[in-house]
Amino acid sequence: MSEKQMHPIIKWIDYRLPVFSFMEHELHEYPTPKNLNYWWNFGSLAGIVLVIMLVTGIVLAMHYTAHVDYAFDSVERIMRDVNYGWLIRYIHMNGGSMFFIVVYIHMFRGLYYGSYQAPREILWMIGVFILLAMMATAFMGYVLPWGQMSFWGATVITNLFSAIPIVGDSIVTLLWGGFSVDNPTLNRFFSLHYLMPFVIVGLVVLHLWALHMHKSNNPLGIDAKTDQDSLPFHPYYTIKDLFGLGAFLIFFAYFVFFQPNFFGEPDNYIVANPLQTPPHIVPEWYFLPYYAILRAFTADFFLYAYTPIAWIMSAKLAGVLAMFASILLLLLMPWLDGSKVKSSKFRPVYAMFFWIFFLDCIVLGVVGGKPAEGVWIYIGQATTTYYFVHLLVIIPLVSRLERPKTPPESISAAVTSKAEG
Amino acid sequence: MSDTADPAASAEIDEQTRRDFLFTTTAAVGAVGLATAVWPFIDQMNPAADTLALASTEVDLGPIEEGQSITVVWRGKPVFVRHRTADEIKSAGEDDKAELPDPETDAARVQQPKWLVMIGICTHLGCIPLGNKSGEPKGEFGGWFCPCHGSHYDTSGRIRKGPAPNNLPIPAYNFLSDTKMKIG
Ligand code: HEM
Ligand code: FES
């Protein structure tokens, strides 16, 4: 749609507010590397899941009551009495898990192909902030149905802040608005759970803005140089993204319709009881790796006991800080990685460590779901150690010592040589 | 002031410093004003007056037999009231000399040795320790056991083993009569 083809009314509007040429530029002509594989679908999928969460959430809020005496019953009423309430709640409930699946894949994609490297550092860092905002949103959302896990999860997590020296307890009281997790806590969590997704929308806008400055990275990790290297976004990638969406929605719908409580905890169908702790408190699956890191820090963990950390803080505080550090360190990825070549395709040693790291994260997740006893304690401490060693030692060293293979001349050269060979 | 077209020519030294001064003081006053305006929006999150007013709870001690405990709710928190046996009092006193992560004598934790009154919230991450009902595990020191991450408390409610850093806290309370007590 060039200037000439525009309808006069559209042209009139566009002259005053250039939304149409903006869309044309960013969604239609937008040059995209021609060699993107399916791992590049997960960004658009994440955006769609965000929209699904907004729509289902706003509808749920029309029936939900944020009061300790009514919250649990109002959710049960949504499940039984509200027309299609069960469907909308199950979409929202499983949508939370889908969101994290998609975003975690999206992030590992970035780690594998070096998408955080120059000039995409800020793009990557905004992504990390989106993850943090998602975690806050999901944590507060999980409190809303006011089941046993809602209550005790909220209690354990808010109590983490009591580890902060001196002001810790005042902060916890401030978060609670009382002397325990109670009605004021539920109310503010509802307010913030409603707010945070819109903050995420804002961050996503910045994320895409940064993306469109330097365009997508690609599996080869080399820049698109000529027109030969790119395709217009529409129709090539709109179609590919839609196809991926179809496949993803089948996966999503399977859980919504056939396994709606697969990701959940049965204890959350018991109304919150402040006088009784469930025997085994576990967070939602997407928090398990961090929970494992938190719990790894016991007084006798060698990373704590035999390092200066033990001189300056309690094991509890060390665990809390390590948990936050495990995410915040990702912000430094662009600088921890000193390689000139982006894609792991040309960095076999780095690629091997990438997969070990990936496995490490999975094992951390498994450990986080087990009671902290016996052999699990040691597995948790070993995988926690590896997590930090990978980020702080292995990446900086390997990326600077490894001699990568030479990437092809250009994207189009790689594509045609593959087609011919 | 009016001639700003050529700043190099018009900027006399004293004019500059006066501007700097005005600029700095204005910014400082503005920052203080902003901070003052922000405070109400933070403090509103702290406990409200009516929440604070749920201050005290009365407990009838008559029906609690020796060796029994009850849990009462005070400010939304569970409070353990235990009628201790002679054995428990004795071992609590002896353990004053044991290795305690949070040293405190048993005498300092009770008003009358047979009544142990504590907030029943694990000082680790806030779970409710088990051991207040008969049949629940009491941990390795015969007091309370927190199942969440394995903290053991003794018959004086002191932390002995596990990740919790402190003893179970003692709320403010006083005896109104031989069989009545007020917490808070
Ligand atoms: C970033 C997107 C969002 C995420 C990750 C998210 C996550 C969650 C989670 C995990 C739950 C608990 C589900 C359960 O176990 O029942 C929940 C509940 C809830 N959310 Fe969201 N949410 C999001 C957006 C929204 C929005 C925009 C609203 C609009 C107000 C909303 C309103 C609600 C309500 C009312 C509940 C309680 C009902 C229920 O538990 O099903 N959510 N959310
Ligand atoms: S909360 Fe009691 S041991 Fe962690």
Image: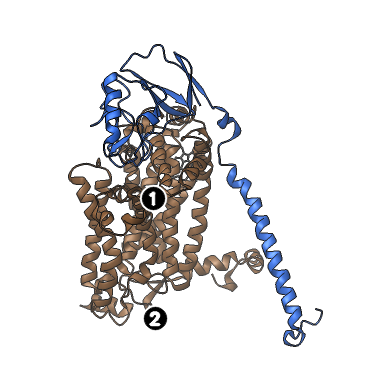
**Residue A282 image position (x, y, % from top left):** 32, 40
Question: Within 10 angstroms of label 2, few (less than 14), some, or many (20 or more) residues?
Answer: few
Q: Looking at the rendering, which quadrant does residue A396 occupy?
A: bottom left
Queried on whether the Cβ of the residue with tag 1 lies below 8 angstroms from ligand 1, the answer reads: yes
Q: Determine the chain carrying the residue at label 2.
A: A
Left or right? Give the position of B138 relative to B53. left
Q: Colour of chain B?
A: blue
Asked if disc 2 is less than 8 Å from ligand 1, the answer is no
Element under disc 2: loop
Q: Are marks 2 and 1 on the same chain?
A: yes
Q: Residue A99: which disc?
A: 1
Q: Which residue lies most toward the right here?
A: B2
For label 1, the crowd category at 10 Å Cα-Cα, with few meaning under 14, some 14 to 19 and many 20 or more, is many
Classify A147 as above or below A300. above
Front residue of A285 and A74: A285
> Where does label 2 land, which residue?
A225
Residue A195 - label: none
In the figure, the brown chain has which letter? Answer: A
Image quarter in which the C terminus of chain A is found:
bottom left
Q: Residue furthest left?
A: A375
Q: Earlier in the sequence, mark 2 or mark 1?
A: 1
Provide residue B86's location: percent of width, then percent of height.
29, 19
Classify mark 1: helix, strand or loop. Answer: helix
Res B45 quadrant in image: top right
Task: Answer with the quadrant where ligand 2 appears in the image.
Answer: top left
Q: Is residue B102 above or below residue B65?
A: below
- Depth check: A193 or A27 in front? A193
Q: Position of residue A121 (x, y in %)?
A: 42, 69
